Image (cartoon, helix red, strand yellow):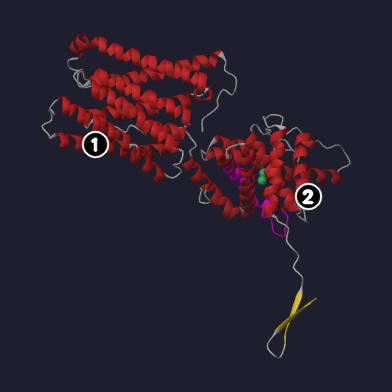
Amino acid sequence: MIVKEFGKEWTKQHVLKSVLLFFMHFLILTLIVGVLLLWDKFNGFTAEMRLNGARYLYALFCLFLLTVIMYFYFLFENREMISSGRNIALLFTILDLYVIVACLVGSKLDVYARPVALVALLIYVLVDRRSAIFMNIMSALVVFIIDTVADVNMLNQTAYSSLMIAFSAGMLAIFFAGKARTRFRVVLIGLFVVLPIDMIVFLLEISLFVSGPTVTGLSVWQEILLNMGYGLFGGVSSTILFLAFLPLFEVIFNCLTVYRLRELTSSDAKILKKLKEEAPGTYNHSTMVATLAEACAAAIGENVDHARAAALYHDVGKLHYPEHFTENQGEYNLHDELTPELSADIIRSHAKDGYTLIKAHHLPDFLADIAIQHHGTLPIRYFYAKALKLTDGELNIEDFSYLGPKPQTKLAAIIMIADASEAAVRAVNARSPEETERAIRKVIEERMDLEQFAECDITMADLTKIRLALVNALTGVYHHRVQYPNIKYKRSADGTTKGENV
Ligand SMILES: [Fe+2]
Ligand SMILES: [Fe+2]
């Protein structure tokens, strides 16, 4: 999940900032490529430049051109991606990392042993498929430029075939990564991309054999097998490096992946575990809201996994004073001893406390945002009504209202509605579909009257779909129970049992 720093506005300052950041990362990439190309030529640097300076200039220009192309691609196709320095740094760090690993493996081991699917897999999981397809092409081209400049004696055929291998292995990894929801399946992708690599290697080596003897002294078949082994190493090392680097990128760039999301929503996740132990009522309520939020998100095409996570974390702020919330109370109500003002203050603080807690644990931003937005600026009705009973004077309703902000996204609106609907339907005694529908309609209409959806782009059509999804989910949960008749059983002397209505 990427950061949207600039929102929908894209001003001259944003263009300037992103161009400067791209230029800075271009310089870093150039430095890396320069060191990789010249690291063993430092002694004869001047002589090398006099001899091959034009080739290095060619490499420099190609890298610059690719950076410009990369900038325009994201500017036109995925502006959000370059709307934050963090995202730009993520793209270039993955590219830099691949360039370093590919060049070292290429020079120390073999060009076929490069982890060719690494960029594709990392960008696919950390960003999205379109960016992964584009960056796969970019990384293959950068390494190709280095190959063609690094060794004038390098057989052109090998340079071109490694470009083809890098491109096709990366693309296939992206197309099959969609099914890879477990880490084990990612390893299978690594094995799968070996097939095209080894096929290319095999055909290439055969063609080289036809054109002349091997230079290594190995027999042709030994050479073919060795190179195919390198191909296998390349595919497998792609996934091993992917699995090794992914957690680092997740933490450093605060990226949200399916793997991290699964860990965050597991009942063993740190905050959720605490919630389960210290506020079991809130935990149960949150899991119920998660089921409802998933149904709502599916109904309007929002991300179901994100909806589930946001619902599980929406009330974690209640951990500060769990016993002050109805769902965690027993017989005794602590609010009986407090003024309505103080009670309202404690209740409304859970939205802000949730935000602070999520931020303190460096969890994804959208969880914190939804925690603080899920009650919007709604009044806390119970304590406002209590205060009205106790006073003859004027009351400021804002003293009994949540501080906001109102939901800023469709997902935040979903959590607001699912949260209130769960509580409202639980309060309805006979849970027929009609009564459930009425309760949910009231929840949505009340929030519309109080303009709680004014700052997010949810539509009337979305709200209708959400209402229907909630009725469906809640009547499934609180389904109507058939009243069982009372029967009294009697056992007669002959051992048979008879029953009669009571
Ligand atoms: Fe809440
Ligand atoms: Fe809640």
Q: Is residue 328 above or below residue 463?
A: below
In the figure, is residue 173 to the left or right of 473? left
Asked if residue 84 is positioned above or below residue 360 in the image, the reply reads above
> Which residue is outermost to the right?
392
Residue 91 falls in which quadrant of the image? top left
Locate residue 163, reporting x and y percent: 31, 25
**Quick one: SS at disc 1?**
helix
Q: For this view, does 418 lie left or right of residue 391?
A: left
> Please, is residue 192 above or below residue 481 in the view?
above
Magenta residue check for 319: yes
Residue placed at 66% from the left, 53% from the top? 323
Q: Main secondary structure of the magenta part?
A: helix
Neighbour tally class for label 1: few under 14, some 14-19, many 20 plus, Cα within 10 Å = many
In the rendered structure, which amino acid carries the disc numbered 2?
A: Glu
Q: Please name the residue shown 31% across and 29% down the image.
A: 165
State the image coordinates of residue 118 (x, y, percent, origin top left): 36, 33
Question: In whole angstroms, how far apart are the C-alphas of marks 2 and 1?
Answer: 67 Å
Q: Which residue is mark 2?
A: 434
- Tag on residue 228? 1
Depth check: 465 or 246 in front? 465
Question: 211 and 332: which one is in front?
Answer: 211
At x 17% / y 15%, what residue is drawn? 44
Start and end of the magenta stretch?
308-333
Q: Is residue 369 magenta?
A: no
